[in-house]
Image: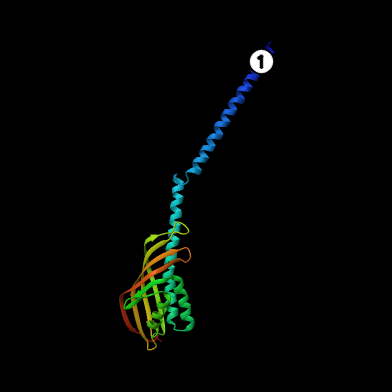
Amino acid sequence: MTDQTETKATRSRRRLLRVMGGVLAAVGVAGVAQAQGQKVDSPGKGRHGGRHDSRHRAMHEAMARQQIMELRHAYGIATDLVGKNTPEGIEAGRAIYRRIFTADASIGAAGVDSVKGPDAWVDIVKGALAPYNATQHLIGTQYITNLVVPDRPRAGGSAHMSSYLQAWHSNADGNLWLFMGTYEDDLTWSEESGWQIKAMMLNQVASDYRSLGKRPD
């Protein structure tokens, strides 16, 4: 009787352990699934998700600012190419203007009526720089405001940029004209062309005239 009783008790304990084990396993799986579901269903709601979103936005904003500033750098190069007054230089400058300006951009400067489009601006620059045998446009202190970064592939962006200018112009007689001014640019972003200038105005701050001297012996 004792052996038979012990056998029944052992069997009962085994069944109880199996049942408890199944319950614990079910609870454990459900807990894991719930935890995983919270992570998937609520990305970015937690501390780490929000931090990732902030880094993502900051990265895209920094990239946009760099791309916008490069437009003004390219403008200086293009203008000096046109200022060489050679067919090759003029066409190279024109190609850059067409890339950095929208086709219908409003472009103007102090003492010059605004024109529409980069090709019309090539003609203005070519005439203004024709008397000079060398030019150099130094652009810096760029300040970007009202930046709206596109957040979807087809969503537009916009910004405003102010840039300081010092432009040196020398002629064959050894005279130098130094122009100091500020570019004010309105910019737009499109999926087809990226960032471009849609309106530019160059305001004059000051100017100076000098005679270029000989290099000392």
Task: Specify the quadrant of the image occupied by residue 72.
Answer: bottom left
- Which residue is at a point 42% across and 73% down the rendered structure image? 75
- Mark 1 lies on a secondary structure that is helix
Which quadrant would the N terminus be assigned to in this image? Answer: top right
Nearer the observer, 191 or 84 = 191
Q: In which quarter of the image is residue 58?
A: bottom left
Q: Is residue 89 above or below residue 70?
A: below
Way the structure is coloured: rainbow
Q: In this view, does 14 lie to the left or right of 148?
A: right
Residue 21: image location, x then y, percent: 59, 28
> Is the residue 108 above or below the residue 4 in the image?
below
Q: In this view, does 166 lie above or below 61?
A: below
Q: Report which residue position mark 1 lands on.
A: 6
Looking at the picture, how far across and down is residue 44, in whole percent?
Answer: 46, 47
User: What residue is at 37 percent from the left and 77 percent from the top?
Assistant: 167
Judging depth in this view, the residue of 176 and 58 nearest the camera is 58
Q: What residue type is labelled 1?
A: Glu
Observer-nearest of 131 and 185: 185
User: x, y percentage for residue 50?
Assistant: 44, 48
x%, y% of residue 211?
34, 85
